[in-house]
Image (cartoon, coloured by chain):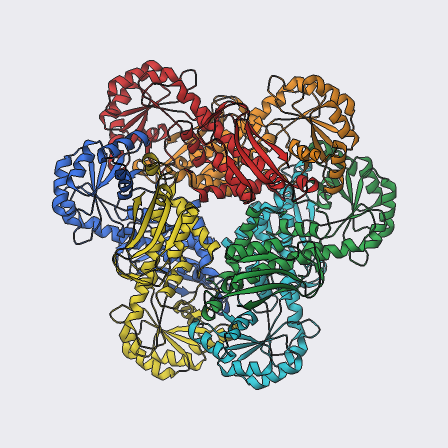
Chain colours: A orange, B red, C blue, D yellow, E green, F cyan
């Protein structure tokens, strides 16, 4: 699995603690502690599966004797009725783990599915769909993983792994009388050389100025299609170009057709609907 | 503030660790460490505000010398342009905290706003909108708080604080030949007396049987409007009734008009869109 | 096991860290690192066993190669000389885990045994023995589990899973001029509907007023036997009744005979004596 | 305060998380969020106070604006009616913190009080009352602190800070044919020189042998008074002597009069009754 | 301060827990709990100061009433006798915090000083001294911060924030028959576009091949000076060049003079000697 | 293994989190997720191996299916080319774990090797080489373990497990007019009896005074050889003697020959160079 088990274990443990409280009192009251059965995890909507490995880990964290068979791997396109995994063993354990396992699986699959819709929307065009730092607190790595599963690419993981000069930086620096050119130059000089320098601009002339100043990536913030096309043209390959802000499934293809290299979309992680997935239990 | 600071601090710290990495290298490279300024937190869409206290705590956790003035309290109905808080102090600190503060605020306000839309949809009717356990791993308490802010009521916090006999329990118990009546009776006997007993049913006769067996709450799972009305009628006040499954903004009022006491909706927490909120910085 | 392994593992790890420091320097200095042996866990006093699963987990957390055979399950009535488990493997590992394993086992068995004495004291009467929130910081779930093992029932797990209007609430609300009736009504209206409303009263008329106001449970605080009887009579089944305060093994049966439904006792968890249990090692 | 705030904060945070769940729903439902008042912490039984600093920290951890005035310091002898602290501020905050603050205070005062009773029992004799490692998991440092407050002295904090050759070590080593003399010699050689070597013995000749082998401290395990006297005599000051096992308030003075230097008692921490202490709230 | 307080607090708390155990028993035994005094932190060797903010935080974490006055900021060149800070307040608190505060300060100043020596060694040349991922487990961010304080630049923070194709990757990929050119091309295609691609080479032809394949940075691994010069010449500015392996203070200038852009040195963090710094206490 | 797995697991997890970030993006981009291979851990410099068990645990924490074969145990004297372990399995997992495993192994082996050099320097003399509390924050137990592996002995683990009256204590107490004799007497009286009392002195008369006052251990701080000899002579076996301060490989034998019992050296842990060790990967 592409994610580190030790790190995810901690997130899972917190989620279980949150969901279990003193334990599953309903199951304790009603079902014999030794009863065995099998749960099928079944998809209820069309989408892209992500997080099945995390779900498996949840079951094992509750009871390492549960036998989890993965039937569909992350990245699979799924639809109503698809069985993605089978969990066999103690019924009480399956019921304890059910909600947390599904909560991870539904959310991550939701993110992957939403990403997949955007990726599909730009099919055939030389552009990459990217996420942002607008992720759920404490789930960043998992959500960024789901974006990759959905065919997207990750933008910065955190503030420490990339230079991105944003509107608020520019607001401060311009007040000191600095031009975009001077700002980019300063960043190239002071920031770690191993990193590319990206700058956010709002107009075509700013994009040109940034390119001339040697920016590696230029983010066009909330620009209209016409201006994006002009920006692409005037930058003329001297820098990579990222479109950001106001992107929807309706306009993503048009944005891509302007010739930008990346399209970044906060909604991939902050507003994706969960993919409906459930567990159906059968006792032995 | 209705949430416990100590508990939230831990969630905030994890979110900051996740977002900061080694620190904000862009700001370090460009902006003088002593520069001061003011950030305004501004709403971009209509909705209900939730999480402003958490956002404030984020700023203080990064730098306790930041001065955060809350202009609108949680629960306020907000729209484009509303200023919800003002943060003054060290510019680098404001920029470090910005994304994490907004990530909390946008998500919680998204949940509160979505809840608010459902609550509004049933205005004037004697029914309560409830959440479920389909929450984001590690954010349950915060999201359930946001549901309350939005006018909703909380269903079970975790498996340990309520008896809810669900389809998977019934599947197991029926295989042993037990009727709903026997199952409810067993729950009333074995489970803690201080808790109400809720049972999920799929048909009107089952609802009736549950009521006669002394269930305190009966959950009608994915029932059509006609059957809901019948169930309400035949239960005749002997138990509270909850509708669940397939509820949307389009049908919520019709569901409420069947006479059910609660309507529970997973989408309040698992599929709410973030409310768009941003921070605008002005340097001194 | 009725408790969640992942949650308990964290408590065990803290207890081990606390007890091991740099490690068991005595054993390191004296006993060959590969020496093997068998430890018998033996009971020294009469009581009810609780926590054997936790003890087993302690041994495995120190050394997963230890072979732990459980001879008596939680809930067993034990007496001097009973062997409850056998631990075989590396001697140094057994000695490292010994104290922590016994500390859990002795305390939890102490709580279960104390609970058992009260349960026995009311044998044959239709009353339940309950715990309180007066538990050891960080061991609440385990101690409440031990209460259940001892035949008791759990009162609220935490402030968030039940409505209990206590003397201090009443003190504040009465100062605003509210009657018990108004207070109960307000609670029924504002608190989550899925929860029962309990209120603490000190006199028979208050109990009656609470019942009429629709309280689900009425707690009689430190009332004498005569008044308890009167309260039971005047409430007349409209609410469940809980006796609390000043309960001892000497008076518990008399209290039960007044007809109350529950008797809650803080001493089950805050003042139970540990059950004496030891580990006897035999080297190979 | 003699304990490290940072370490205790973590224990407090866990205890609060455990007790608060989603928050205090009763108080939220009934009492206005801005209501202010004053709580008096009042003692209900005779004993020695310990943990008032921890209790104060609990209140501050819930709400740093609470004003906590300590009226009686740790170590004070208290009795029914004594006021030990006054907490003023937000009523909801006081109620949220109440139970956890009292749980710490009652337990630690219980340990200090029990210790105090033993210390009093040997008043005037040149002997010290010591605790053991039989402490509550995760509360060791606090309980050992309470022992000191009660006038006792701490035995080993953990396995890594002292050499104590116990019965189980002897069982293993004797099977290899080693005498106590050889075992003590080996410990003196292999263990850190900065630490004293203590050995547990069961007979007078073993005590003598241990003294001659150069043990610094000799623990007499479950020995009768007569043998203790003989052991003290034959060791004749060459080592310190500790009595352990079966000590009660009834026999502690007799044990002390045998001339031993220490008496160690597991019950100080594993079986102390909580000291009854409560909080009385008065709204403004 | 350039580091995030919340993150560092956790590291400090662990370090304090590790150093305090039950608390400072020597000080408790000897010094009155209310005694006040002043400690001067004094440098004993020449070097560059780093970590004074962390040291300050340690004192405050132990006792927030200590008054810490910083006399010399991080980055100051210091020598024997320089006073870097003054700590005033409770003597017991100062003594509790002393060792941990100094442990941080000595190590970080050691790293900064070692870095400074290398930076000085290449003074006037257009080259940057960089660290590696060979840092102390759990102190990476702090040590990388110290490198910056010493005038160095940070290489990758972690495996997730940069593409660096190392010898072990090449070993695997070559076995599949891939050339460096193909490997670099694959990396440019599959890895996040926002990141530069760096590749490690051992010969001049490999360096040339990497440059032609479009690598952004080429690391010359353990190359001799002659080859480095040739590599710089043949790459001819198409990529940045990093020298790595076998760099010492004796050869660093010669390496720099070959024209490489970076020199990375594991010893900055894995083998720096602590800078000798002590605290001198004066009681009032 | 002499260290507790549960405790070390936590340190390893933090180190992995620190090094992995989102995961190993280079390997993900280039190497097939199912590729298998074998890594050899090879020593590059002469020294003493320590931490191979920790390294093994790192590999297993990243991927429990990796097969780690330990070829040389901790304590082995190693030199260039020695193979210490073999790791077989998934290539991506090996690469993820590599740096963290080596960082632990290099540092601990560095400490053991440095200790070994001092131990060798005093070979044949009746003296023990000891460490100090000048360890790396959060690695104390591991570093102290490495000291033992290198043949050294551990001084205090923390402030709570030994009485050591240092210069700063004396500075405070002398200001009250107390003599060393009075100070030692007070410590013997107030501190736990189970612990030895050590005191730091700077002159021969102070050493004599301390011995007469009954100190168990006397630390000679930065004394010259001549004075050390005199101190040894005048103490005349009444106390153990420890030399501290200014010890190097050049003078350690001369110091030992003065007759002191211990030599404590901060540099063992605060300034040991890492032992150069690498992993060489071969794909299948």
Question: Residue visible at 37% across and 31% down?
Answer: B154
Horizontal relation, residue B10 to residue E42: left or right: left
**Compared to A253, does C115 lie above or below?**
below
Please state which of residues F4 and F130 is positioned toward the viewer in this rendering.
F130
Residue F76 can be seen, yes or no: no
Percent position (x, y) of residue D157? Answer: 44, 64
Q: Is residue C207 left or right of residue E207?
A: left
Relative to B116, E162 lies left or right: right
- Rendered image quadrant of residue A129: top right
Q: Position of residue E207 (x, y in %)?
A: 82, 42
**x, y percentage for residue D172?**
43, 68
Image vertical order of residue A44 relative to residue D9, above or below: above
Report whether E16 appears left or right of B148.
right
Q: Residue furthest top?
A: B226
Judging depth in this view, the residue of E61 and D171 nearest the camera is E61
Can residue D74 be seen here? The reply is yes
Note whether E216 is above or below D262 in the view shown: above
């Amino acid at each position: 699995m592409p994610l580190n088990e030790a790190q995810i274990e901690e997130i899972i443990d917190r989620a279980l603690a949150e969901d279990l409280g003193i334990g599953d009192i309903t199951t304790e009251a009603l079902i014999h502690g030794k009863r065995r059965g099998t749960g099928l995890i079944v998809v209820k909507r069309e989408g892209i599966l992500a997080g099945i490995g995390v779900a498996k880990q949840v079951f094992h964290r509750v009871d390492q004797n549960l036998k989890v068979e993965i039937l569909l791997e992350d990245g699979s396109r799924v639809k109503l009725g698809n069985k993605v995994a089978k969990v066999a063993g103690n019924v009480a354990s399956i019921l304890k783990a059910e909600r947390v396992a599904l909560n991870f699986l539904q959310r991550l699959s939701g993110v992957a599915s939403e990403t997949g819709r955007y990726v599909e929307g730009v099919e055939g065009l030389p552009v990459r769909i990217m996420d942002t730092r607008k992720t759920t607190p404490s789930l960043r790595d998992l959500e960024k993983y789901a974006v990759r599963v959905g065919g997207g690419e990750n933008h910065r993981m955190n503030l420490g792994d990339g230079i991105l000069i944003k509107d608020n930086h520019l607001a401060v620096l311009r007040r000191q009388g600095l031009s975009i050119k001077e700002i980019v130059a300063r960043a190239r000089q002071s920031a770690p050389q191993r990193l590319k320098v990206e700058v956010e601009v709002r107009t075509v002339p700013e994009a040109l100025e940034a390119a001339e100043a040697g920016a590696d990536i230029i983010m066009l913030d909330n620009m209209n299609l016409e201006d994006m096309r002009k920006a692409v043209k005037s930058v003329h390959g001297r820098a990579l170009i990222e479109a950001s802000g106001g992107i929807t499934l309706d306009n993503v293809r048009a944005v891509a057709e302007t010739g930008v290299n990346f399209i970044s979309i906060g909604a991939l992680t902050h507003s994706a609907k969960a993919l409906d997935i459930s567990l159906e239990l059968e006792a032995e």
